[in-house]
Image (spheres, rainbow, N blue to C red):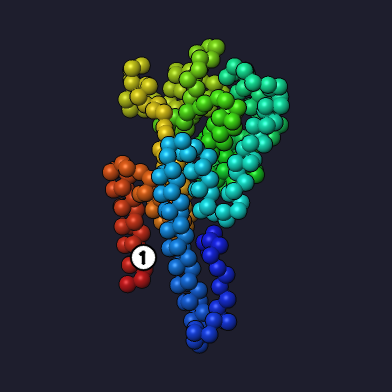
Amino acid sequence: NPPPYELCVLQLPTVPFFHLDSLADVAAVVNVAQHALWILFDEELRQTWKDLLRSGAHNLTLEVGATVLCRLEHPSAACAGVSDQLQAIADRVATRLGGPGHRTLDVLREMNHVMFNEMGFQGNVEDYYRPANSFLVDVLATKFGIPISLSVIYAAVAERLGVRLHGVNAPRHFLLRTDEAIPGGEHYIDVFHGVRLLSLQDVVSLIGAAPGWSFMTDLQGMLPVADPVQIWCRMLRNLIHIYRSKHDTRRLMLCMSQMLLLSADAGVHHEMDLHKYRLVGTARILNP
């Protein structure tokens, strides 16, 4: 289970300073080398995030951070093509629109036609917890995703067409919101379920009853607009859950490391520390 890291290719039998008496020795050296590469990969990802966060708010676009997350399972060369693919989708929509100056609803309708009718984007309800559903590289290739990854792609395409959409960290689901009034009063967009336009009450029906939803005055507070960093953290939280369930300890640790770097929430830090404590404790029990 080697890391997606392009630093070097190990040629252990040709390295003169290794004295390998058995296959067990070879396996031990390979294990140590792979562990070292994972550490280097973690440092590279953390440095990438630090550089991005220092670059200023104007560079913190959803797609940039979501593309960094793709590095967990894809080489950097594959991730570099995400922006061009998003632009290609926007160009197809722009061709259908025929020029600038369209209402938000018109832009969204043409986006829906191109992305969901012509290209076949859809929610992956059959294999929801597949890691690839979270990575833009895979979603753009397979057209299957989960609410947050589909929403990031949808918002990135809309941004290129002059429509600003905001991510909404709703309980149990991820939505988009437009600040521009749409006929019928709908402000929310559910990309996962066929790009439905939703009113506030529609969102309540979709998500279901939850604590604190008793009064209308509480509802807006339960649907906070999320900034890019908060959205990346939610994507990381999804991946943490997936990798923990799949016992992919190395990628789980990478996700937790990135979460600790991105989130300023003390509760998140405590949660990640507990995860790491459990992992280290299990390792010590298995390898006393």
Q: Is residue 34 visible?
A: yes
**Side of 142 where 174 appears, left or right:** left
Decide: is 80 above or below 118: below
Residue at left offset 42%, top offset 53%: 46
Residue at left offset 64%, top offset 27%: 111
Would you identify the image quadrant in which residue 133 lies?
top right
**Side of 153 where 201 appears, left or right:** left
Decide: is 75 above or below 64: below
Q: Amino acid at mark 1?
A: Ala
Q: Residue 16: horizontal and vertical position, in percent?
A: 53, 85
**Side of 3 where 119 appears, left or right:** right
Q: Residue 274: horizontal and vertical position, in percent?
A: 31, 52
- Total residue callouts: 1
Task: In this rendered view, identify the residue nearer to me: 286 or 184.
Answer: 184
Task: In this rendered view, identify the residue nearer to me: 139 or 85.
Answer: 85
Residue at left offset 54%, top offset 21%: 197
Residue at left offset 57%, top offset 55%: 75
The local secondary structure at tag 1 comes to helix
> Which residue is farthest top?
184
Quadrant of the image containing the C terminus = bottom left
Q: Is residue 213 visible?
A: no
Location of mark 1 (residue): 283
